[in-house]
Image: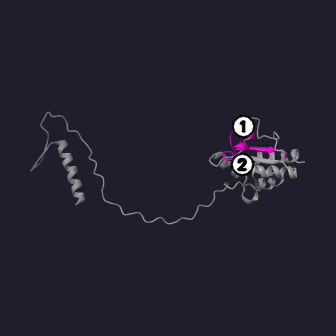
Amino acid sequence: MRTSIVALALCLSACCVSGRETDEGLIPPPPGAAAPATTTATPPARTTARPAAPPAVPQPAPAPVVGETWGGAAIAWRTPAEGLAEAQRTGKPVMLVLFTTWCPHCKNYSRVFEDARVAEASKGLVMVRADADKDEATSSKYQPDGGYIPRTFFLKPDGANSGIKASDGRYGYFYDERDPAPLLAAMARAKREITR
């Protein structure tokens, strides 16, 4: 029934554009009249009610994405206060990473710490991570070349910046976010030059 109504509506619409309709059918427009405009009628939108969606089935939590754990349990991360206290007690250099949770470069960089060589090298350092948005005091203290993220510093046990950099460029404390080799070289240098 609905299909018939739509077809009739389309037919009437076409007839109104092309000419007059009689019992015998469509009478064309008179000679000399402008050519009829053609239109495409759009069928009316359906108004039938859809069935209600089934209730949501609880889904298991998604598995953590590799790299979101910054090396997971293989690396003993500390807060800045814990890390500096440990460094003063042990004489080990501190590796400080400033990041944020919304930064795509930070997420990429976090995957570097999944490398087994980085996890092994971390054992000779005091590993500190700080969210620059949440720990503004630490973030503002270590901005020798700007507040970009991620930034990685190698600190002396008293918290002073050792000056070990990724590059001499504009973002000197920005290490390669995909290749662990530059970070591994800096970690080895920090152990040689800073450890008491």
Tell me the SS state at disc 2: strand
Q: Is residue 175 visible?
A: no
| Residue drawn at the location 73% of the way across and 50% of the way down | 129
Q: Which residue is mark 1?
A: 171
| Residue drawn at the location 31% of the way across and 59% of the way down | 48
Q: Is residue 74 visible?
A: yes
Q: Position of residue 122 (x, y in %)?
A: 80, 53
Residue at the limit of the structure toward the left, as seen here: 23
Q: Position of residue 153 (x, y in %)?
A: 77, 43
* Neighbour tally class for label 1: few under 14, some 14-19, many 20 plus, Cα within 10 Å: some
Q: Position of residue 172 (x, y in %)?
A: 75, 38
Q: Is residue 52 magenta?
A: no
Q: Which residues are magenta?
A: 130-157
Query: Looking at the figure, which quarter contains the N terminus?
Result: bottom left
Q: How many marks?
A: 2
| Residue drawn at the location 87% of the way across and 52% of the way down | 90
- Residue 173 is left or right of residue 124, and the answer is left
Q: Position of residue 60 (x, y in %)?
A: 57, 65
- Residue 126 is left or right of residue 132, and the answer is right
Q: Identify the image quadrant of residue 54.
A: bottom left
Frontmost of labels 2 and 1 is: 2
Q: Compared to 53, does 154 lie above or below?
A: above
Q: Which residue is mark 2?
A: 130
Q: Amino acid at mark 2?
A: Ala
Q: CA distance from mark 2 to mark 1?
A: 18 Å
Residue at the limit of the structure toward the right, as seen here: 196
Q: Nearer the viewer, residue 90 or 162?
A: 90
